Amino acid sequence: MVESGGANKQSLQRDSWGHRPGPQGFTTVIIDAGHGGHDSGAIGHGAMEKSLAMDTALRLKRKLSSQFKVVMLRSDDRFIDLDERVKLVNGYSSAVLVSLHYNSSRSSYIRGPETYYWRVDSHGLAARIQQNMEQVAGGRYSGQGKKRRRLRLTRNPKIPCVLVEFGYLSNAVDARLVKSASYRDRLASAVAGAIITQRNIGDAGTGVLPRPLYQPLSRPTDRPGS
Ligand SMILES: [Zn+2]
């Protein structure tokens, strides 16, 4: 059983499992704008995921660049394979990764922001981001909230990493919201605030850490959701 991390616990060194409290005092934020190039991601209600993700990534960068070294995995409309993104991420230390996405579902009523994490050391940051986003979105709604899921960008990097889904393009209400630049700016502020708080106080106040899970690296051939 891993106890909740206090304010003095730090985990800045690289580690393939990340079974320890979340980091404090990190100096670098890596921002991954999801999809790009021929991979447009989700499309719905006149919105395209890759463009919204890029826009939100740039907003987040502007909000963080006075306080951190900010690295953008892509700065324009280009395709980068997920395994290549992991390779780029693993070139950095004293860093956290946030991968930014907009969601889609076959069920048009599902809406709301979600945050995925896998590593124990990413739980606190995921909790902070999800809580801040729900304040912007006005509640939990029907999405999954904060969710532990083994994805290539939550399991495979050697640094704390979370994947953010800002809202569902397949839902009319969410789509209308996320097409608004001011709403996207508030979401970017929510994520920026969570990162700054995590940098300042680590996992303090984010509750009991999840159990360590020993699972292999995520592969493109994995069953979705496995
Ligand atoms: Zn996506």
Image (tube, rainbow, N blue to C red):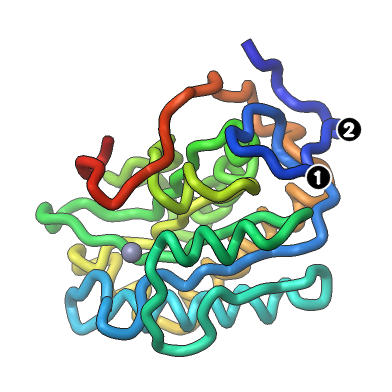
Q: Which residue is mark 2?
A: 8
Position of 210 with respect to 174 (left or right) is: right
Residue at the spot 29% in from the left edge and 75% down from the top edge: 176
Residue 40 versus residue 43: which sits nearer the camera? Answer: 40
For the C terminus, the quadrant is top left
Residue that extends furthest to the right in the rendered view of this protein: 8
Secondary-structure class at tag 2: loop
For the N terminus, the quadrant is top right
Position of 66 with respect to 157 (left or right) is: right
Residue that extends furthest to the bottom in the rendered view of this protein: 76
Q: Which residue is mark 1?
A: 24
Residue at the spot 59% in from the left edge and 80% down from the top edge: 59
Q: Residues within 10 Å of mark 1 (few under 14, many from 20)?
A: many
Q: Residue 187: image x %, image y %? A: 52, 67
Residue 84 versus residue 68: which sits nearer the camera? Answer: 84
Residue at the spot 39% in from the left edge and 38% down from the top edge: 149
Residue 129 versus residue 9: which sits nearer the camera? Answer: 9
Position of 153 with respect to 122 (left or right) is: left
Q: CA distance from mark 2 to mark 1?
A: 8 Å
